[in-house]
Structure formats: structure tokens, C-alpha cells
Amino acid sequence: MKTYRLIGVELSPYTIKLRALMRYRRIPHIWICRFPQFFPETENLKPGLMPTVQYPDGTYHTDSTIVCEDLESLHPNVRSVYPDDSAMKFLAILIEDFCDEWLSKMIFHYRFTYDRDRAFGPRWVMDDTYPGLSDAELNEHFETFLERQTNRMELVGCTPDNAQLLERGFQEITRLMETFVSNERFLFGTRPSIADFSLYAQLGILLQDLTTGDFMRKETPRTISWLMRTADLSGLEGDWELDDTPSQILRGIFSLIGNIYLPYLNANTTAIRNNAPHFSTRLDGCAYEQPAFKYHDKCRNRLISKFEELNASERKRLRAFLAESGCLEALGRLHQV
């Protein structure tokens, strides 16, 4: 098996998601912290995201979701992270999307809202990226990065008006995880799925930042242990345990997806279809507003496509659970937009 090159930084959730997944799947790769000497080979890539993965054929790829699917196609039947059961696979993919696109807002909110988080996380990213600089040189990069990211907060919905929803959601998902990891190992059995790695990535970064990390060390210590273990599961052997009766953790996560994430995607797509630059909606009882975001329209289309790939029997199996969580109605609305 040929070797991949994974280029990123430690405080990028998508970087650690792919690194943990590749370790578990035992896919040969070289981990490269994105130092300046690597800038020339990645600076012209569009979009300029982290991580960057160089495939053995020499091509570069940046979307972690697509890379995970590519790895599945390129290395079939090798410790797959997608459940064999198509219905459960859809649930895992929906959780992945929720983590990648909604929980990431929590990282952005905390890291660039509170003074001590603003002073810590962004400086770490810059120190990772530009090692060996003097304090004065590092501080110049830090200030530039901090200003750029602060200016993006409204774009991604991380505003004071949306703070209550994001902070309540962070506490809810971490407390759900604490109850879960006290009794179970992974969401779909004794082996990790794409959903587990996506949860690991976002929560793992939230653990590193100060405000959220302090909360987790006080309130969710067993979740921290789970995160540490999930970083490298290369020695783990396990099985899928697929049950049509969803676990409590799945019920909790899908309640968040049905009441917050899918209605958010629906409101965003409606704005895009109407050429509206912004949208306002209510999510789980809270007012929410942000500029329309085209990439999340692509996410919505992908989820619809994945749902439509299920046959009638598979949809029937999921119907009661999706209806209970509000996801069935929300998925129906996605179709109508």
C-alpha cells in the first residue's frame, strides 16, 4: 500500500479527524505539520483548507468528507468506518455532517469570543505554523490571523445573538457523550464509524481551547478519556452492533440534528434559492441569523442524495426514529426547497 501525506495543524478538527481515521484503518501516511517549507506546494490549492492530503498519485485534496469516501473506495474492505447496513450508514453520515458543519461553529464561537481563548488558540495555531519565530514576529502573525478570523465570525453565524444556542448545544452534546462513554465504546458497536471520528475531531479541539476545556475537565472527564483513546485506534479490533432500536446517545444526537441542524440547512437553502444574502429562523426555540452559505447548500444536497439512495425497506426501518427526532419532517422540507 502506497503512502499518503497528511498536511495540517494540531488545532484543526478536520486534520485530527483524518489522522485518527487513517491510523485506525492502518493506511500508511506521513503526518506533516504545515510549516512554511510546505507552503509552496499547497498555497495555490482552491479552496485553501486544512488539512491537505496528497494521494499516492501526487494529487492534492482538502475536503475531509470527500477524502474519507475516497479512502473507502481506494481501500475497500479494510477496516471500514461505514457500517455495512445501509440504513445505519446513512445515520453515521448524517452525524458526520452535523459534527463537521454545526459543532465546528461552537469551536469558532468560543475561540474568537472570549479574551483568554482569543489569546490562546490562535497563537497556538500560528506557533504550529511558524515555529522558530521570535515573540515579536509570532505576535505579528497572531494579530493578522486573529483579525481575519474575527472578521469571519458573522459569516459563520458566531454572533452574540446566536451565542446562547451554540453554548447550550456544546453543553448538551458533551453531557450526552459523558453518559454514553460510561457504558458504550462507539456509536454503532465496538468499532468506530465515521460518526465517531467526526465527534472525536470537534470535541477533541473543544477540549484544547480554554473555556470549553475547563468545562469538559470538570463535567465530562470520561469523555476526555474516550477522546484520548480515539486518537489512535490502530490496535483496536471490533464489530458493528446494528440494532433498529436506537441507543440513548443516538436519540440525543438526532434530537439536535432534527431540531437545529436540518432546519438550519433548510433555512439556508431557502435563502440561497431566493437570492437572499441573509436569513433568520428559529432553531430549538432560539432566534438564529447568519449570511447564506453556499457550501451548506452542497451539504444539504449531499444528504438528500444519500437518503434517496436508501431503498423503501431501509427508509421504512428508519421512519419511526427519524420522525421521533424531528429529522423526518426536516428531511421532507429539504426535499421541498
Image (cartoon, rainbow, N blue to C red):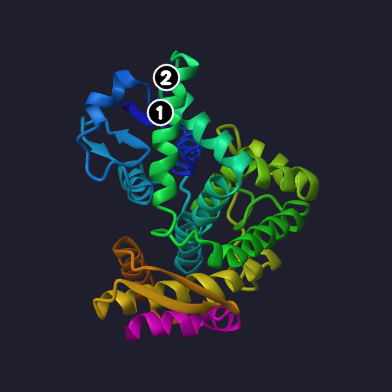
Q: Is residue 7 visible?
A: yes
Q: Which SS does the magenta portion mostly show?
A: helix
- Residue type beneath disc 1: His
Left or right of 316? Residue 226 is right
Q: Which quadrant of the view contains residue 9? A: top left
| SS for dot 1 | helix
Q: Identify the residue at image location x=59%, y=70%.
A: 256
Q: CA distance from mark 2 to mark 1?
A: 7 Å
User: Camera-side residue: 104 or 69?
Assistant: 104
Q: Is residue 323 above or below residue 222?
A: below
Work out whether 279 lies above or below 92: below
Q: Amino acid at mark 2?
A: Glu
In the image, residue 273 lies at what x, y percent? 25, 78
Residue 137: which disc?
A: 2
> In the shown orientation, is residue 276 left or right of residue 13?
left
Work out whether residue 325 or residue 317 is closer to the camera in this orientation and state it. 325
Where does the C terminus fall, quadrant-wise? bottom left
Q: Which residue is mark 1?
A: 141
Label 2 crowd bin: few (<14), some (14–19), many (20+), radius 10 Å: few
Q: Is residue 68 above or below residue 57?
A: below
Dots 2 and 1: beta carbons under 8 Å? yes
| Residue 21 image offset from top left, x and y in percent | 48, 40
Q: Nearer the viewer, residue 267 or 289?
A: 289
Q: Secondary structure at mark 2?
A: helix
Task: Tell me where the magenta segment starts and ends, as one range.
Answer: 315-337
Judge the density around disc 1: few (<14), some (14-19), many (≥20) Cα neighbours within 10 Å: some
Query: Percent from the top left, x then y, of residue 112?
Result: 52, 47
